[in-house]
């Protein structure tokens, strides 16, 4: 059986996309980790399986479900950059007519809008402030705001230049507060309505971008300013996105790009099962 793949990214947060409408592929953690490995596989921060919600027995307003897996093979609730890539694929493959439609995810249904210029807006749902905690980098403690965007985040607004932080190793955090792990964002305000961010993603490591992380960063910055409404650009190593928060809902707007498509070899797929 030929296994089709596409390779794409949203602000350089990159993904292998696997069209699998009826759910015939056996996506084991080993296969996902091998696909995402940058030496023995295609290389990616995660895998997006395109599958019908009914094939997974999931109730959704939309026909299609974004089955997202981290690079280590673990399952994740939501990925904002991945959702943009996923949505653009559905339109370009003729599976959705657009420009606006609903996609299912483990964090719930998400409305999307695919623009003529290739950018995509995702209505991300609420960004809930859930408390405060601390991240530790190189023995230094950085206080942070805990934010849930369908998945857990800890956002530290820091005076240090985020470009100078060593995020190769996972920063330490309170595992009692975040028993399922956490995405860790470090943020510099760089002007009115503008942030700069780096992120260490749960199950992946440092990535060039994290869509839910940019939403969490803006929510935390607004919270510390005493409000829950506003808009900000967020510069990440992979580019720039725009995040808006209003009335309990967040929007994320940014590019989605495809770079390649092809077929996985059957013997490779079998070997890594």
Image: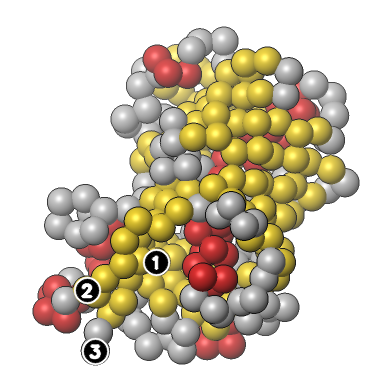
Q: Give the distance between the C-alpha atoms of the residues marked 1 and 3, in whole angstroms.
A: 17 Å
Q: Give the distance between the C-alpha atoms of the residues marked 3 and 2, in whole angstroms.
A: 10 Å
Q: Residue furthest right?
A: 247
Whether residue 3 sits left or right of residue 64 in the image: it is left
Disc 1 crowd rating (10 Å Cα; few below 14, some 14-19, many 20+) is many
Numbered disc 3: secondary structure: loop
- Labels 3 & 2 near each other (Cβ < 8 A): no
Whether residue 252 sits left or right of residue 165 in the image: it is right
Q: Position of residue 170 (x, y in %)?
A: 37, 34
- Labels 1 & 2 near each other (Cβ < 8 A): no
Q: Position of residue 29 (x, y in %)?
A: 31, 67
Q: Which residue is mark 3?
A: 1
What residue do we see at 48% from left, 49% from top? 10
Q: Which residue is mark 1?
A: 17
- Which label's residue is closer to the chain start, 1 or 3? 3
Q: Position of residue 153 (x, y in %)?
A: 58, 40
Numbered disc 2: secondary structure: strand
Q: As displayed, is residue 190 above or below residue 174?
A: above
Q: As displayed, is residue 54 above or below residue 32?
A: below
Q: As displayed, is residue 109 above or below residue 135?
A: below
- Which label's residue is closer to the chain start, 3 or 2? 3
Disc 3 crowd rating (10 Å Cα; few below 14, some 14-19, many 20+) is few
Q: Which mark is residue 264?
A: 2
What quarter of the picture does the N terminus occupy?
Answer: bottom left
What residue do we see at 65% from left, 31% from top? 233
Whether residue 157 sits left or right of residue 258 in the image: it is right
> Does the rendering let one see residue 173?
no
Numbered disc 1: secondary structure: strand
**Which of the 4 image quarters holds residue 74?**
bottom left
Disc 2 crowd rating (10 Å Cα; few below 14, some 14-19, many 20+) is some
What residue do we see at 51% from left, 70% from top? 92
Tally of numbered discs: 3
């Amino acid at each position: 059986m030929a296994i089709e793949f596409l390779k794409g990214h949203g602000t350089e947060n990159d993904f292998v996309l696997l069209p699998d409408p009826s759910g015939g592929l056996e996506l084991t953690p080993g296969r996902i980790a091998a696909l995402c490995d940058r030496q023995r596989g295609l290389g990616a921060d995660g895998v997006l399986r395109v599958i019908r919600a009914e094939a997974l027995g999931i109730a959704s307003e939309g026909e299609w479900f974004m089955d997202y897996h981290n690079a280590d093979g673990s399952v994740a609730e939501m990925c904002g950059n991945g959702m943009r890539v996923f949505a653009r694929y559905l339109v370009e493959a003729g599976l959705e007519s657009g420009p606006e439609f609903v996609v299912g995810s483990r964090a719930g249904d998400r409305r999307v809008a695919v623009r003529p210029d290739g950018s995509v807006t995702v209505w991300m749902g609420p960004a809930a402030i859930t408390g405060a905690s601390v991240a530790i980098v190189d023995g230094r403690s950085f206080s942070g705001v805990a934010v849930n965007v369908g998945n857990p985040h800890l956002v530290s607004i820091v005076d240090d230049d985020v470009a100078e932080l060593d995020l190769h190793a996972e920063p330490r955090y309170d595992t009692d507060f975040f028993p399922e792990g956490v995405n860790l964002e470090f943020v510099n305000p760089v002007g009115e309505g503008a942030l700069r961010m780096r992120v260490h993603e749960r199950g992946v490591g440092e990535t060039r971008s994290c869509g839910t992380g940019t939403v969490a960063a803006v929510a935390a910055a607004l919270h510390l300013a005493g409000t829950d409404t506003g808009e900000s650009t967020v510069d990440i190593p992979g580019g720039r996105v725009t995040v808006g928060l209003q009335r309990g809902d967040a929007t994320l707007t940014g590019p989605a790009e495809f770079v390649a498509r092809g077929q996985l070899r059957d013997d490779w797929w079998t070997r890594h099962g």
